[in-house]
Amino acid sequence: VQLEESGPGLVKPSETLSLTCSVSGAFISSYFWSWVRQPPGKGLEWIGYISDSGDTVYNPSLKSRVTILVEKATNQFSLELRSVTSADTAVYYCASTIVGATVEYFEHWGQGTLVAAPS
Amino acid sequence: SSELTQDPTVSVALGQTVRITCQGDNLRSYHASWYQQRPGQAPVLVVFGRNDRPSGIPDRFSGSTSGDTAALTISGAQADDEADYYCSSRNRIGDHFVFGAGTRVTVL
């Protein structure tokens, strides 16, 4: 399974960050899919996931600004983050996600894409 | 602050064993997963579940849990193991995922 993020590397403050993750080697309907971000020099932050049936769960700290969608026809899923500020500057990763009763993990990761929202 | 607590740094002599811990109440209910991140690279899953490794991950990486603390052990550390290691699991009430702040492992 391979994942590749794409989208603008620069977003103006107050505008919307939009990224796409292209999946190869697996059907988009076979997994859950997550977005994870990492500000420069800092740790990982989970943004949210979309299930194989299209249900979404978001990080409460970002929930009011985030939408994750799946496009089965193109085997892609997307991230939309509204009203960005400089605090949203980060490397954004997409990842396949195993969700279970007690065993859960992020199995495959994209290489990441840096999105800057300069103040 | 994260709901999963990790030591910021740890060092290990080449060929020796190092244990990286991750503490959180939620670990009594959910297994932790562990990720290795080398500088400038994406995270890589190294251990998940009770003590499972994806294909291609050396068996010197192992996982364990006792109470509210999960541990990743590297037995016979190699220079190539120098990286940041993150644990992940559910938050305290189980409604979303969280990561620990990460542990930087230095191989001396």
Image: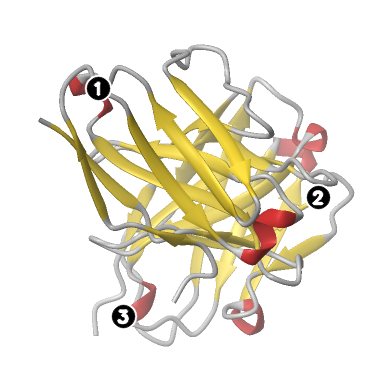
Q: Is residue A109 left or right of residue B50?
A: left
Q: Nearer the viewer, mark 1 or mark 2?
A: 1
**Rendered residue at 30%/37% (across/down):** B41
Q: Residue at x 76, y 68 (%)?
A: B95
Which residue is most to the front?
A: B66
User: Label 1, label 3: how many angstroms apart (C-alpha)?
Assistant: 42 Å
Residue with the mark numbered 1: B16
At which x and y percent is residue B94? 76, 65
> As drawn, is A114 to the left or to the right of A37?
left
- Please, what secondary structure does the residue beneath circle 1 have? loop
**In what element is the residue under mark 3?**
helix
Q: Which residue corresponds to mark 3?
A: A86
Q: The numbered mark 3 sits on a residue in which chain?
A: A
Local packing at callout 1 (Cα closer than 10 Å; few below 14, some 14-19, many 20+) is few
* Residue A51, numbered circle: 2
Residue drawn where x is 26% and y is 37% of the image: B83
Camera-nearest residue between A86 and A19: A86
Chain under numbered label 1: B
Q: Chain of mark 2?
A: A
Identity of the amino acid at label 1? Gln
Q: Indicate the amino acid at tag 2.
A: Ser
Question: In terms of sequence position, does the residue under pointer 2 or pointer 3 come before the other?
Answer: 2
Q: Nearer the viewer, mark 1 or mark 3?
A: 1
Residue A74 badge:
none
> Given the current orientation, which residue lies at the most extreme left position?
B108
The answer to which of B35 and A79 lies nearer the viewer is B35
Q: Tell me which amino acid carries mark 3.
A: Ser
